[in-house]
Amino acid sequence: MARFQVDYELKCDRNEVLNKLKDIRSIPTYWKGTRELQVISDDGKVAYAKVRFAFPASGKVRITRLDDGIRMDYLEGPFTGYQETLVGTEKIVSTWDVKFNWMFKMMEKKNVEHFKEGTKHALMRLQGIEVQP
């Protein structure tokens, strides 16, 4: 299991960030590791979707809108587990607890570092902060 947390200082209006975060169809615009998100069902609280990642893999995810963020439960794919992103009054915190499957398991340490960097960039993009390549 890979467990880690990334946080970033909140530098703009909290409600704007929350609204963008809860607009699940916008996830690929700021979370570049998610190439495509095809929503299968959405009742306003919980959504189920098919996801295509930036690397050659796909999976299924359940997305739950929380009062102060979202929780993404990865049900099938190259990794399973969850990622929860919460917007506080001073920072945005993203917590991951995932298990890598298949060949991704052999590169777990490298994947975790890559996911941490991608998470930091996503938390910046959520706030409209430009990420330098």
Image (cartoon, rainbow, N blue to C red):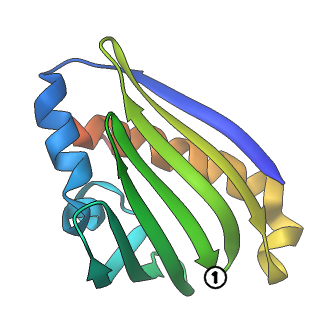
Q: Secondary structure at mark 1?
A: strand
Q: Where in the figure is residue 122, as x and y percent of width and height?
A: 36, 46
For residue 62, above or below residue 127: below
Q: Where in the figure is residue 71, as x and y percent of width and height?
A: 47, 52
Residue lying farthest top?
A: 90
| Residue at x 62%, y 33% (from the top left corner) | 5
Residue occupied by mark 1: 76
Label 1 crowd (10 A; few <14 / some 14-19 / many >=20): some
For residue 112, above or below residue 103: above
| Residue at x 12%, y 22% (from the top left corner) | 13
Q: Where in the figure is residue 73, as x and y percent of width and height?
A: 56, 63
| Residue at x 82%, y 65% (from the top left corner) | 107
For residue 61, above or below residue 86: below
| Residue at x 35%, y 40% (from the top left corner) | 69
Is residue 86 visible in the rendered image? The answer is: yes
Q: Does residue 127 appear left or right of residue 80 in this picture?
A: left
Which amino acid, by three-letter code, is at mark 1? Glu
- Taking depth in this image into account, of 105 and 40 the one nearest to the observer is 40
Q: Where in the figure is residue 51, as x and y percent of width and height?
A: 43, 81
Rendering quarter of residue 46:
bottom left
- Taking depth in this image into account, of 40 and 91 the one nearest to the observer is 40
- Taking depth in this image into account, of 46 and 96 the one nearest to the observer is 46
Q: Does residue 48 appear left or right of residue 42 in this picture?
A: right
Q: Does residue 40 appear left or right of residue 17 in this picture?
A: right
> How many numbered marks, from 0 up?
1
- Taking depth in this image into account, of 79 and 35 the one nearest to the observer is 79
Check the picture and name the quadrant holding the N terminus. bottom right
